[in-house]
Image (cartoon, helix red, strand yellow):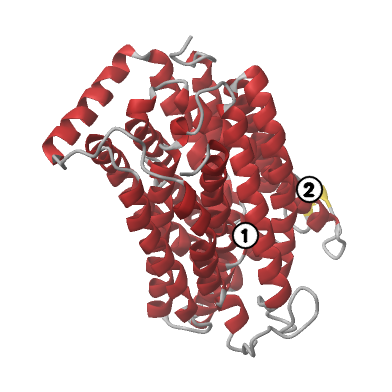
């Protein structure tokens, strides 16, 4: 039988195994590659470069919004069903299969393809995204079984730090050995992609999908060995009873002001953070004309700061509680977004810059470091705040609702970005709705009890 320490490490390994879906696919490799391919398609269809960039960002946003809507609708229902049956792990493995299928299939996202190629890449990415998000819900619900002490904040923060370390190592391996620059055909360390991959067919970059799938399969082994279903017995599946329980939980929110305010806040700021991750690499490609390798270096920097800040944030969470960590992180992210929206290669909020200099790149690298430093602790502290508003026996339902609060508007953020991009014709100004979402989340935290419902 696994010891408590082994169970904690096994639970941490889920973060290590799954983080590359966000790091490699969503933000730093596949997302920018998708934008690059889409931009080429629209320019081939006759659009000017700036219009093609906006169209590429809008297309990515449309599909991301569609799959986020599916996640929003299914998350609380699945949480209630799992709560009713007492099963978590079976759902982890079901959605892990979708994760692997979606990621591995991205190999066939060819450069220079037609609209069908873009649609294939978007749909398979979405299938893997569903798998990652739902596997995370049920893994998070196992957190209360890891310890009976007050160190849950430290465990959560350390888990995120460990996950970011995994994502960072995976990103470095991908950039050093596989992902080629579109201009030189070389990897980050100046070599041809290994395994004989053809740079002209972008095989090194396309390998990011199978690589992410293999990484997940290998590093879920400790989770499989050490994390077991909590004691208490598994019940039969009764959809009606599960939905009735969910309805009861949602109905109780009108009597639970702190939880309601927190879910509303998380609804806004989680969506905004996801928007940064979903469009950050696309922004760098479209606005700053960065290559995949430059975007990858940006990701490495963000991963380092996220890893360090998540570990440190976990300690602050344990000492002061999750709410101050959440507030501080949101303030930093608002300031970063104000810089990003106001920046072009030629100017920053009207202040001229030499477009041929490295100053715009340096500013965006600093922004990347701050995004990582704030985003990691924000996510870690968010799940400990959920635990302060629930009990271990209803944790899966609570995390289902938390996933709903984080995803119910996740289709709105891409939609707003898509609309703003279309109206302004600017990939840069299209990012501006993120700032509003962060502000809404910050204001709603006023009504959240720092100690939750365990005061």
Q: Residue at x 38, y 49 (%)?
A: 134
Q: Position of residue 22 (x, y in %)?
A: 55, 55
* Quadrant in the picture for residue 67: bottom left
Residue 289 in sight in this render: no
Q: Residue at x 32, y 32 (%)?
A: 397
Q: Secondary structure at mark 1?
A: helix
The residue to which callout 2 is attached is: 366
In this rendered view, identify the residue nearer to me: 80 or 366. 80
The answer to whether residue 367 is above or below residue 110 is: above
The disc at residue 281 is 1
The answer to whether residue 455 is above or below residue 183 is: above
Q: Position of residue 314 (x, y in %)?
A: 65, 31
* Quadrant in the picture for residue 295: bottom right
* Marks 1 and 2 close (CB-CB < 8 Å): no
CA gap, disc 1 and disc 2: 15 Å
The answer to whether residue 100 is above or below residue 78 is: below
- Residue 125 as seen in the image, left or right of residue 157: left
- Residue 320 as seen in the image, left or right of residue 148: right
- Residue 111 as seen in the image, left or right of residue 401: right
Q: Residue at x 43, y 74 (%)?
A: 105
- Residue 309 as seen in the image, left or right of residue 63: right
Please tell me how crowded label 2 is: few (under 14), some (14-19), or many (20+) other residues with Cα within 10 Å.
Answer: some
Mark 1 or mark 2, which has the lower sequence index?
Answer: 1
Q: Secondary structure at mark 2?
A: helix
Please tell me how crowded label 1 is: few (under 14), some (14-19), or many (20+) other residues with Cα within 10 Å.
Answer: many
In the displayed image of the protein, which residue is found farthest to the top? 455
Q: Position of residue 390 (x, y in %)?
A: 39, 22
């Amino acid at each position: 039988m696994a010891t408590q320490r082994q169970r904690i490490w096994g639970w941490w390994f889920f973060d290590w195994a799954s983080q590359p879906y966000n790091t490699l696919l969503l933000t730093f490799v596949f997302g920018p590659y998708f934008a690059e391919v889409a931009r080429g398609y629209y320019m081939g269809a006759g659009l000017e470069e700036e219009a093609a960039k906006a169209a590429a960002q809008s297309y990515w946003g449309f599909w991301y919004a569609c799959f986020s809507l599916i996640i929003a609708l299914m998350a609380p229902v699945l949480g209630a069903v799992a709560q009713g049956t007492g099963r978590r792990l079976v759902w982890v493995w079901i959605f892990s299969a979708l994760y692997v299928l979606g990621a591995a299939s991205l190999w066939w996202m060819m450069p220079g393809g037609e609209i069908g190629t873009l649609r294939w890449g978007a749909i398979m990415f979405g299938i893997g995204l569903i798998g990652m998000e739902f596997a995370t819900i049920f893994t998070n619900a196992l957190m209360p079984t890891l310890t009976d002490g007050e160190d849950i904040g430290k465990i959560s923060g350390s888990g995120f730090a460990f996950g970011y370390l995994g994502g960072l190592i995976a990103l470095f391996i991908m950039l050093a050995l596989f992902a080629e620059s579109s201009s030189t055909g070389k990897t980050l360390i100046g070599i041809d992609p290994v395994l004989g991959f053809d740079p002209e067919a972008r095989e090194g970059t396309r390998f990011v999908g199978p690589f992410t799938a293999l990484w997940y399969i290998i590093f879920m082994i400790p989770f499989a060995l050490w994390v077991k279903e909590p004691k208490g017995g598994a019940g039969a599946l009764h959809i009606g009873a599960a939905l009735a329980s969910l309805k009861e939980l949602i109905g109780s929110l009108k009597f639970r002001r702190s939880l309601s305010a927190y879910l509303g806040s998380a609804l806004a700021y989680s969506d905004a953070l996801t928007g940064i991750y979903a469009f950050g690499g696309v922004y760098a490609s479209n606005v700053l004309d960065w290559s995949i390798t430059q975007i990858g270096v940006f990701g490495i920097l963000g991963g380092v700061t996220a890893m360090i800040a998540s570990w440190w944030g976990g300690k602050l969470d344990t000492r002061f509680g999750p709410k101050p960590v959440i507030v501080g992180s949101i303030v930093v992210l608002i300031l970063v977004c104000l810089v990003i929206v106001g920046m072009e290669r030629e100017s920053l909020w009207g202040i001229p810059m030499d477009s041929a200099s490295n100053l715009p790149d340096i500013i965006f690298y600093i922004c990347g470091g701050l995004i990582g430093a704030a985003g990691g602790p924000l996510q870690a502290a968010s799940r400990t705040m959920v635990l302060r508003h629930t009990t271990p026996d209803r944790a899966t339902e609570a995390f289902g609702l938390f996933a709903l609060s984080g995803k119910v508007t996740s289709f709105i953020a891409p939609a707003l970005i898509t609309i703003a991009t279309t109206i302004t014709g600017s990939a840069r100004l299209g990012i501006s709705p993120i700032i509003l979402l962060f502000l809404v989340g910050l204001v709603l935290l006023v009504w959240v009890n720092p100690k939750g419902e365990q005061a």
